[in-house]
Image: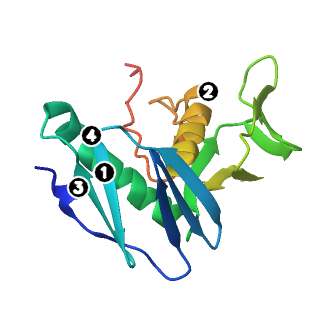
Amino acid sequence: MSRIGKKIITLPEKTEIKVSGNLISVKGPLGELSRTLHQNIEVEVKGNEVTVHPKKTAIESKAIWGAYASHITNMVSGVNKLFEKKLILEGIGFKSEVKNDKIVLALGFSHPVNVPIPEGLKVTAEKNLITVAGKDKEMVGQFAARLHSLKKPEPYKGKGMRYDDEVIRRKQGKKSV
């Protein structure tokens, strides 16, 4: 039994949810999100309460039951409040700026790194702080992880791109006698 799947999802004001066939769509003040449901998952909507149930008692349906409950919860909270990830760029000469639909990064390579911003995300770059915001939690996390992977922080001086809540374990370096 899934603890997350058993929880009832309550819908806030001005939020609608529609289930048609294997497609679920959530509409709120910030827009609309939709996702296809797995064939073994069933979603019930009663008033402002949503429950998720497995259709069968198979191992596969029990395994994805909680995952789909989490997806629906994230969709409901995403159309009401934007998800946000912050990245800090540390190092001399490391810069970031947003140009049109791309983010241009100077990461110590011989060339600037251009990364296209996916549709539906809002990216801002101020000095050494990059903020990725959007209503789809998966898309925000995936894009932030993609930026983070371009220049991971190194353990000696801490140079690179790190999340704002990430702690870098520092190493001592060489000792001179």
Estimate the spatial distance between the alpha carbons at disc 3 and disc 2, rounded to whole Å: 36 Å
Q: Residues within 10 Å of mark 4 (few under 14, many from 20)?
A: some
Q: Position of residue 22 (x, y in %)?
A: 44, 44
153 with respect to 100 (left or right): left
Dot 2: element: helix
Q: Nearer the viewer, mark 3 or mark 2?
A: 3
Q: Position of residue 82 (x, y in %)?
A: 58, 64
Residue, disc 3: 5
Estimate the spatial distance between the alpha carbons at disc 2 and disc 4, rounded to whole Å: 32 Å
Q: Say whether disc 1 or disc 3 marks the residue closer to the N-terminus.
A: 3
Residue, disc 1: 42
Q: Say whether disc 1 or disc 2 marks the residue closer to the N-terminus.
A: 1
98 with respect to 61 (left or right): right
Q: Amino acid at mark 4?
A: Ile
Residue under the point 55% across and 51% down: 34
Estimate the spatial distance between the alpha carbons at disc 3 and disc 4, rounded to whole Å: 9 Å
